[in-house]
Image (cartoon, rainbow, N blue to C red):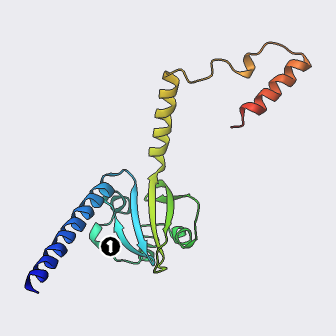
Amino acid sequence: SIQHAITQAIAIINTRQNENLQLRYFQTAISSIDEGVMTLKNQRITLVNKKLADIMKVSLAESIGVDVRRFADTKLPASIYDFLEQSNPEEEIFKINNNSFLVKKIEIFNEQNSNEAIVIFKDVTEIQQQEQKIRRELQTKGLVAKYHFKDVIGNSSAIKALIGNAAIFASTD
């Protein structure tokens, strides 16, 4: 009766507090990553992190709940909509406000069969800088070839055949 209703009310309050705490953790995590993140449900934007809002040059508030096509040609290139409509598209590079971004769409499947997705925008320049940093670190650690095929001495057909075969093997994983 009254005791049971109070116990249920307390349980509901505790559950909501836990959900709010998890939501804050999720929002903090999404806001702190270096990629732009957008979530979509039936082509409506349900979440945009600060990084993507900065990329699109919009406020967070003006983008939530809006049909993603509203930003056609003003904030996002029109070609991105064909990409977002595809089922399981590969990553693709798009130019947004004079910067290139590698865009990846991850579809979310659920019981309601609604069209939901997470879209991630990675700055191509940042990817290139990360790759260069990794190459420098590998080179510093000595994980770079000391000798190359051009260093092999010899002009015989056997040596040339050996170098050719070695080049073929070296180019495979």
Q: From the viewer's perspective, tell me whether residue 104 is left or right of residue 5.
A: right
Query: Eyeballing the image, is 129 above or below 137?
Result: below
Q: Residue at x 50, y 63 (%)?
A: 105
Image x and y of residue 140, in percent: 48, 22
Q: Residue at x 82, y 29 (%)?
A: 165
Instruction: Name, please, the residue furthest toward the bottom.
Output: 1
Query: Eyeballing the image, is 160 above or below 97?
Result: above
Q: Residue at x 49, y 79 (%)?
A: 113
Task: State the SS at label 1.
Answer: loop
Image x and y of residue 107, in percent: 50, 67
Query: Eyeballing the image, is 150 above or below 100?
Result: above
Q: From the viewer's perspective, tell me whether residue 153 is left or right of residue 19.
A: right
Image quadrant where residue 45 sits? bottom left
Instruction: Name, please, the residue furthest toward the top.
Output: 153
* Crowding at mark 1 (Cα within 10 Å: few <14, some 14-19, many 20+): some
Q: Nearer the viewer, residue 12 or 67?
A: 12
Instruction: Name, please, the residue furthest toward the left.
Output: 2
Q: Nearer the viewer, residue 113 or 18?
A: 18
Image x and y of residue 50, in percent: 31, 59
**Residue with the mark numbered 1:** 64
